[in-house]
Image: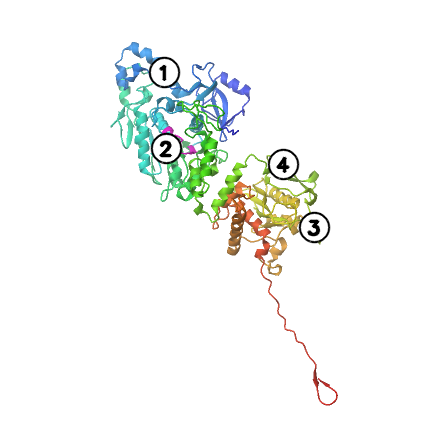
Amino acid sequence: MYEQSLYRVVTPIKLTTISRLNKGKKWEYGYNKEHDVVVISRTGQIGEIYEIQNLRIALPKAPPKIDKKTDRWTPEEYPRELKSITSIFDWRDYPEEFKIKWGIYIDGQFNKRENGHWFNNKNVDTYITGTHFMYLQWSKIDVGKPEFRESNRLFYIFWEACKADKRSYGMCYLKNRRSGFSFMASGETVNMATISSDSRFGILSKSGSDAKKMFTDKVVPISVNYPFFFKPVQDGMDRPKTELAYRVPASKLTRRKLDQNKTKEIISGLDTTIDWKNTGDNAYDGEKLKLLVHDESGKWERPNNILNNWRVTKTTLRLGARVIGKCMMGSTSNALDKGGENFKKLYGTSDVTKRNANGQTRSGLYSLFIPMEWNYEGFIDAHGMPVFNTPPEDCEGPHGDAIEVGVIEHWNNEADGLKGDQDALNEYYRQFPRTEEHAFRDETKNSIFNLAKIYEQIDYNEDLANSNVVTKGSFQWENGIKDSKVVFSPNPQGRFLITWTPSYNIQNRQVIKNGVRHPGNEHMGAFGCDSYDISGTTDGRGSKGALHGLTKFSMEDAPPSTFFLEYVARPQTADIFFEDVLMACVFYGMPLLCENNKPRLLYYFKRRGYRGYSMNRPDKLWNKLSVTEKEIGGIPNSSEDIKQAHASAIEMYIDSYVGLKSDGNYGTMYFNETLNDWSKFDINNRTKFDAAISSGLAVMACNKDLYRPNAPIQKRTMKVKFAKYKQEGNLSEIIK
């Protein structure tokens, strides 16, 4: 059975502390630095704390009683008596008895808009934010009323946290097609605009026509269909094409003032506008925005660049260091060279776990990814929950339609039907991703390697995700005694991923030559390593160290031509990394080929007495090596010939051992991080591909004979003297 959750309930704050502060209603809306949570409650009290994509969010405390008349979300009927009222001006003319009668209802709607709403969903007390309530209750979309979906509930909770957190510029949402983002963003635009004065709201999309369509087909209809008590009087056309302007302040149309006839207040106006711009790097440059909606930001194609635009529009959301506006950005991703690469960079720099000294992410945004199985039309039940698995009995959708197949089975069937066309399959993955890697799948023509085979292997590995093929763990010296025996221990926090260990009798096999340790299993395989020299970097984003182990074909009990170890990490100090590498080499008894432009690792090996484990560059004879190369081994990375040989080594391995092979079996390369690194590898910019560098060196190490130069044959002139004789007379006489 497939199980997944987009959030988990955490308890980072003592319950006694929560209770004490709840009693005094001391919890303030916004980021709470002391407890590192974002409070989205406006009541002064908090309840459960959700962690959504590593962001901790404190929800309001549930009320003591929640209506149990229904067991699912059901929109409230708009009272017939109020439907005929189109504006506050009409409302003024009604008698006081009428206003008093409906004042409680209107007051309740304002309260839900401000504080959110609780309802019973399948006997679970369920909270939705005020923005989500406005979307469900009062927004008109292409199918009428929106459906309640659990995925949207968590989306809105995350968005509310982005609004509440003074450190955040908004969200960067990685989504699937038909997730409803455009309508949700349009609903939020209208919701915020109708309670904001002297503000501007902007819309951008992958093209100007798309932005215009979102404005005219989504934003304007939602605004038009708002009830009179939420809707300011607008200036100009009822259904404008370029700008929606509110001139009567919703802030004046409060529940306290709906029964007051204050013409002067009504005339004063909001002076708030919603508009759209043509797509371009400098769109909205110099403006001040309360909300910027960035739709389809992963599809900005050249010459437009979402990264350049964000650098510009980010300034429209701040005054100095103070964030005064928010961005709601959401998109599926194009192929990497069609805008996807820039969006991927923006998404990657929005990780809430990676903040600068000011507490902000590099982009300023907070990233959110919701897998397609949570938000796929036709596979959401009547309670808004995704139907992951094929139900054993009848399951009903929101409109009474039967759901007979689970979304996972449906998705797999679709993917299986496209496996003969890798580019079509990748497009399907990008549109309906189950992982972030799916969302950023590239076209096969954009890689120097066989991307089709790489993705075949990745897909196969993902199907094995819950098997025990890969084990995470750590290496240690036995009993903590260095230079003794190395042992491997499974450990969920370990830095090593392994798929095979040698039998006990050949572990730690070692040969001593002239007092120097040499690996005893060199015939079985070798390691490749991409090292680093400096423990820390000023920006904290230094490249990682990488180590890969690869077997050769041998008569030993080992899987042939298989990557059996992956290590991609950056421990606190470089020495920890060096020791990790050394222990792996000792445990497997295999040598190491490492680039010598960062020589600290190689000097570490020599100093510890393990120079014999460090391979010399295979493309040169011993007498042609430099003094340093003779001392510590290794291979340079500056030579163009070496770069080409390295890339060719990876290419050779992929073609032979990755993906679906001619015998109908899949390769045994189970490390997806390395596979993804291969898929993106740029031979002209190798520095950021740690796993690719390391794994390629492992292939070269195992095939070192391919790179060995032919030793020149020394031709020596040999002078052979033959004795000459005179053949005169009866006796031969030697000629001197």
Seen as rendered, the residue at the extreme bottom is 729
Which colour assignment does the render follow?
rainbow
Mark 1 or mark 3: whose residue is earlier in sequence: 1
Q: CA distance from mark 3 to mark 4?
A: 27 Å
Report if the CB atoms under discs 1 and 3 are less than 8 Å apart.
no
Q: CA distance from mark 2 to mark 4?
A: 47 Å
- The quadrant holding residue 347 is top left
Q: Which mark is residue 490?
A: 4
Report if the CB atoms under discs 2 and 3 are less than 8 Å apart.
no
**Which one is in front, 4 or 361?**
4
| Element assignment for label 4 | strand
Query: Label 2: which residue?
Result: 293
Residue 176 part of the magenta segment: yes
Give the mark toward the camera: 2 or 3.
Answer: 3
Residue 321 part of the magenta segment: no
Mark 2 or mark 4: whose residue is earlier in sequence: 2
Dot 2: few (<14), some (14–19), or many (≥20) neighbours within 10 Å?
many
Q: Is residue 545 left or right of residue 31?
A: right
Q: Amino acid at mark 3?
A: Val
